[in-house]
Image: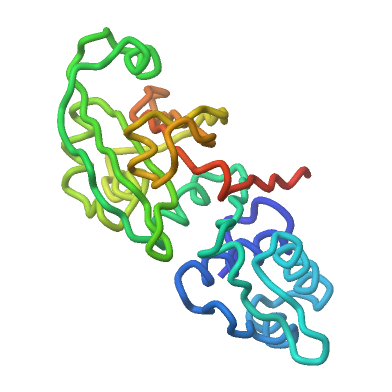
Amino acid sequence: MLTDGRGPLYYQIAHVLTEQILLGQYKIGEYIPSEERLCQEFNVSRITVRRAVEHLVNLGMLIRKQGKGTFVSGEGLDGNRINPMMLTGSLNAATAIVESSDILVLRNEDIMAAAEIAAELLIQPGTRISVIERVRIIGGEPFSLMCAYMPLSIGRLVRQGDLEHYSVLKILRDFPDIVISRGIQTIHAVAADERQAACLKVEAGSPLLKIERVIFDGYDRPIELIYIYYPGDRHEIAVELI
């Protein structure tokens, strides 16, 4: 049930518990399983489980009650502070939350690549490319705005998948001829423009966390450029330094 082995065991367990909470397996106010049961489920020591739970308590996702157990906090899910993103350095982790939330497709069309987009995809400006713009929704509220740009050949494949439930990476991995080799990710702070503000239900000019990710295939060709925007007042990043 753990991930691909990257990162310490307690962090992998914390990541799995986070996904289960987002999927609704453990709802707000409900108690998570006891330490003993989690030890059996993940086949790890009590110390490892305790550290994983403490990690989520520190992030505000869980609350401990003396003599009763640990339950899911409303803060960090549908309150003023959305669940912090845990960056583990894995492309698998990059798709996990997308697949555990509702997605509204806003735009799915072919356009002429602007200079900035063309430079990232290593193509000439004005080349026709595919763009897919979506809003990810958790708890009935906008969680993020995702704008993906890709060559036409890749866009045609992606459109065969379920864009209302799966990430572009997940869809591409279903095609045996497509090999995902690596990704480069950068993080910026930006101000919301009018469209971004409307999509995310924030004021224009509000701070946004912008993640820019370029995905490369087995031939080291860029096949997807995605911009992901998160409301700055509802998100934080927790990075595990190993």
Q: Which residue is at 73% across, 47% downward?
A: 240
Q: Answer above or below: position of 164 versus 133.
A: below
| Residue visible at 49% across and 78% down in the picture | 25
As rendered, which of 126 and 9 lies closer to the eye?
Answer: 126
Place of residue 87 in the rendered image (x, y in percent of width and height, measured from the top left): 61, 46
Horizontally, is 32 left or right of 193 in the view? right
Quadrant location, the N terminus: bottom right
- Check the picture and name the quadrant holding the C terminus: top right
Instruction: Give the residue displayed 56% in from the left and 28% down from the top.
Output: 188
Q: Is residue 79 above or below residue 154?
A: below
Percent position (x, y) of residue 216?
A: 41, 29
What x and y, as percent, mark residue 139? 42, 65
Above/below status of 17 relative to 242? below
Where, by quadrant of the figure, is residue 222 drawn? top left
Q: Tag count in the figure?
A: 0
**Residue 172 vs residue 6: left or right?**
left
Residue at left 42%, top 23%?
A: 220
